[in-house]
Image (cartoon, rainbow, N blue to C red):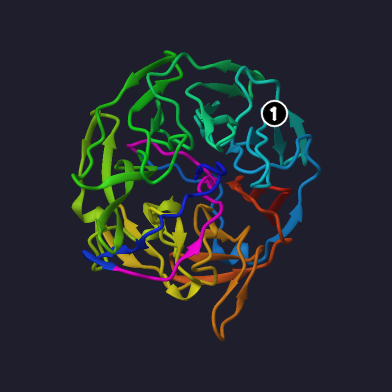
Amino acid sequence: MPDAVNPRLRKALPILAAVAVVGVAVTIPLWTSSRGAGRSASGSSASELSSVEPAAPVTAAALAHYHWSELPPAPITPRAQPATVWTGKQMLVWGGEAPSARDDTVYGNGAAYDPSTKTWTALPKAPIDARGAMGSVWTGSQLFVFGGYDSVNDEGIPHALADGALYSPKTHTWQRLPAAPLAARLRSQVVWTGHEVVVLGGDPADQSLDKPGYVSGTAAYDPTTKQWRLLPTMPTVSGHEVRHLKAVMTPKGIYVWQFWQHITTTSDGGELISGIDLAIYHPLTNTWTADPAAASGLGQRQAPWGIDQLVVGGGTLYVPAVQPWRGDGSMAPPSFNLQGAELDLTTNTWSRTPRGPLDDVGALGIWTGAALLEYDAMMEMHTDDGPTIGPGESAAFDPATATWTSLPTAPEDDGADGIVWAGTQLLAWGTNGLSFGP
């Protein structure tokens, strides 16, 4: 998240940081987080009435026999946090930022990769400005892009945008979105319901901790009628200053996890308490509801911290064992010993996921139709007397046996910000492109 220096960094709070667990503030050591807020995984979308799984489920046992390979050179330069989606035939990559945190360059070009022919095709010029940190989603027929930023001023504050466009692979053309009833924002949460694109929240340009934490206002866009409509105001909890949202489409509606903070100032300094609330939007009835059972579990008053990188598959919401989000952007050290969790969307009950090989590193996750595949593209870490985990490590979780399988290691330093499940293989794009397939 940007601060007054760089649009991919979070500004550290110069007071004591703490985590709210079972209503108690627990102080833990801090690391500084540099990037990763926009990292994502793209797969099949789901409507509120039915969950759509990949056409060819691939088990953890089958993944163990897969291998990594590099993609052919792309007709676009390496970049961070581009819009990356799977169309059913191609991986589309558009826009994004320069890989270096010290370079404010943004891109306005893109390309499509077809794994069946192992070829790239340049996308036509878009009718919108080059940008990074935009929200995006695949609608089933088009790539939807909204918001982001196109430049950074002398104070390091990005210029946020409130426009967008749609790209159709079928016609190989772009169309500009009509004016949206939303304020400019970065990294908005964008969800496809099966009928409309819903845009929720997003980061403001100035994300100093004494500024508003997220951009309010939610709207839905109908690609058929080409019209926007404002949605009812998302409910929040009094005293919980929302700083960040994570939204995902489930068979029960759009689950919106609200990451909040509360700062208490004292004569000795202050304390930051943070936590997670849940609100659910129902597209069919245009209403918001709460779900106390889904909002808390495992003996906690809130969802597990890794909910920011959740993966939905097989009627289950998987929460990886990743670093906890906190309002000051800091991280816990690997010895924090995090553990993943699962929310059964049918029974609405939480359970623990067995410890996995990539716990704590913040690996990207994606659903293969029968397994949870995790891939560590960026982080290297080790604990005292423990193994070293480095970029390229991957593993798969089999929900049928509740076991993890270590997978082959990818070429190092890909730096992928987005991965897609391409039917029978994983495609990753970052500083270079990788595939993981049979």
- Image spot of residue 262 (x, y percent): 27, 52
Residue reaching furthest to the right: 73
SS class, disc 1: loop
In which quarter of the view is residue 250 placed? top left
Look at the image and tell me in which quarter the C terminus lies: bottom right
Residue reaching furthest to the front: 267
Residue bearing the label numbered 1: 109
Magenta-colored stretch includes residue 328: no
Asked if one can make out residue 320 in the rendered structure from this viewpoint, the answer is: yes
Look at the picture and state if 339 lies above or below 73: below
Q: Nearer the viewer, residue 52 or 305?
A: 305
Residue reaching furthest to the bottom: 385
In which quarter of the view is residue 21 placed? bottom left
Task: Please state which amino acid type lies under the numbered disc 1.
Answer: Asn
Majority secondary structure of magenta residues: loop
Q: Residues within 10 Å of mark 1 (few under 14, many from 20)?
A: many
- Image spot of residue 391 (x, y percent): 65, 63
**Number of residue marks:** 1
Look at the picture and state if 50 lies above or below 410: above
- The stretch of residues the image draws in magenta is 26-49
- Image spot of residue 181 (x, y percent): 37, 19
Asked if one can make out residue 347 in the rendered structure from this viewpoint, the answer is: no
Q: Nearer the viewer, residue 224 or 322?
A: 322
In the image, what residue occupies the spot 52% across and 35% down?
157
In the image, what residue occupies the spot 51% across and 42% down?
4
Give the side of residue 150 with respect to residue 118, left or right: left
In which quarter of the view is residue 224 placed? top left
- Image spot of residue 281 (x, y percent): 28, 36
